[in-house]
Amino acid sequence: MSELTHGFTDGEEVLRLERLRKTYNPGTPLELEVLHALDLRLVRGELAALIGPSGSGKSTLLNVIGLLDSPSAGELYLLGQPTRAMDDEQRTHLRNQVIGFVFQFHHLIPAFSVLDNVLMPLMIRHGKPTPTDIERARELLDAVGLADFAQKKANQISGGQQQRVAIARALVTQPALLLADEPTGNLDTKTAEGVFELFRRFNREFGCAVLVVTHDPRLSASCARTIQLVDGSIVSDQMNP
Amino acid sequence: MHLLDSLWTEWKIALRFLADNRMQTLLIIVGIGVGSAVIVFITALITGLQANVIERTLGTQAHIRILPLDEVNRVLPAADGALALILENPRAQRLRSISNWQDVRDALDGQTQLLAVSPLISGPAIARRGVARASVALMGIDPVRYQRIIPIAEDLIAGHFTVGAGHAVIGKELADDLGLGIGDKLRLDAGEGRETIVDIAGIFELGVRELDSRYVYLDLKQTQTLLDLPGGVTVIDTTVRDIFEAETIAARLARLTGLQAESWMATNGQLLNALRSQTMTTQMIRLFVGLSVAFGIASVLAVSVVQRTREIGILRAMGSPRGQILRVFLLQGGLLGLAGSGLGGLVGWSLVQVFNIFGPGLFFIPTDPTLIPVAMAVATVTGVLAAAAPARRAARLDPAVAIRYV
Ligand SMILES: Nc1ncnc2c1ncn2[C@@H]1O[C@H](COP(=O)(O)OP(=O)(O)OP(=O)(O)O)[C@@H](O)[C@H]1O
Ligand SMILES: [Mg+2]
């Protein structure tokens, strides 16, 4: 366990949810409240696993935290800034600055090379990548063990490799918060363990907060903290021994 | 360069997306190319054709002729309550001078829309050499001014363009009819005993029968004496900068001078009609080909937006703003238009060359060097506009939905 992972009170606050609700299709017969008045706080350097049965609202929560979707009520603070009142442009900007995403189906852009995929968040941020950017992207690719694949097209490598590229991409902006939605969902146990090892390592080295959704109890147990979501409510939130 | 820099990422993504869909991109570029080639070729062809027709027609005539008003019978107004029945014979129009023509000329010289102003006196006469006779039109001119209307000197086939001091310049047909050569003498009889003998100084061939067989160019003074109009001119010829404005300018000149102003458009109604309908047809063809090109671009991009929904979602999730997604697709539209019209311009230009070298050879199509750049600029703008709808759709995609799209 890293000395950076202190627990709830220490460290700079990265994320805070206050009575956060999410309702799909509000005002229609299909109206469905998926998240019920959640309170949650995450500080820099924390590594937290989000677990829960299928349909409990884990992906919804991650999308809301990642500003891909907006909450229906309550407030969401990122680095202390309230986000409810922000317009699309501000949310997009904040997403680029603060959040790193890793999805279940890796979601690389197949038209681009592995290196360009990793550089994409920086290109979005400030255009042509600087030599420092490229150096950083290569270091990350090296760290995920894919230094030799930089020039390959993103769809010419295996699923596990793609997921590792996606992690490198999520980290290239040095985000304060890394969100991963079942990143190991379609990987075999060994590859999955390797991917998790990367999370632990970057969490340790960069001190970013990591919130990762997983169904695998072994993997969640290897995180410092486990948050359990059932039917849109947090039923347990505990530190692992 | 600044534009390239600030849009670096947009360029990169747009180019990658186009290159990634190689077949689709290639097909639409060929489609745009065919459309642009048609537009470029038709435009060059019709412009060339019209320039040729206009050049042939207007190269040998004034654009606007200023003439004295026709003489009309003056009828005394009938007394109140009286009914007057009038049997009227139109008056025969005698040769008349434009009064104060020097002032009219000076006023016309001040008109910026006119390129040249040339007062002249013209009237009928009989030309005789030995027993041969021919009816001719005497043209008393100011050579310097007249040359700006019809550059006779360029069409001389013998001798010099010298009028005055007993010298005349005549057309080739007249010279042939009367067996005249340079230096030969010609007797001109304007009736009522007014006669003179002139030396032939030059022979021209304009390719217009009326002119080549009838015109005898003389000094202004000598013609005034022959036609018994001392100090007078019967018509002022002018040319205008914009030939299709001739009618409006003529109307203005008529008001300005109080004289008759006849434009080439009024005297060549048929030709004008033909030119106008040709122009309209060309514009219709251009419009419809342009529209189908635009719809082609729009539909290809609309398909591409659907195909790339998930990638758009990924880009948005990584913090790409709506504007950036919009610009990526607008750029693709512009690039398709540019590439397609570049290709089409080249093909159209080649078609023009083929027409000039192997075609029927009736006339030459000049290749306007601005035609292809203009066509490319228009196609690029069209591409961007055509991309507007799909690009907006792409930019408005909800990232949370788009990223789940399969
Ligand atoms: N766009 C949507 N519109 C309406 N309902 C939705 C939408 N997305 C999710 N839901 C519903 O919200 C609930 C939570 O879905 P969510 O995907 O967040 O669950 P999850 O915990 O991620 O499940 P899984 O483990 O299967 O991924 C489900 O009942 C789902 O049907
Ligand atoms: Mg899920």
Image: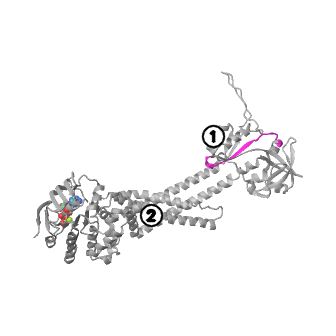
Q: Quadrant of residue A139?
A: bottom left
Between the C-alphas of marks 2 and 1, the distance is: 48 Å
- Label number found at residue B252: 1
Dot placed on the residue nearer the N-terminal end, 2 or 1: 1
- For label 1, count other residues whose C-alpha is less than 10 Å away and answer few (under 14), some (14-19) or many (20+): few
Query: Circle 2 is placed at which residue position?
Result: B336
| Amino acid type, mark 1 | Arg
| Amino acid type, mark 2 | Leu
In-front residue for pair B198/A16? A16
Q: Give the quadrant of the N terminus of chain A.
A: bottom left
Q: Which residues are magenta?
A: B225-245
Q: Is residue A2 visible?
A: yes
Q: Is residue B230 magenta?
A: yes
Q: Report in which chain the residue with disc 1 lies.
A: B
In-front residue for pair B347/B269? B347
Q: Report in which chain the residue with disc 2 lies.
A: B
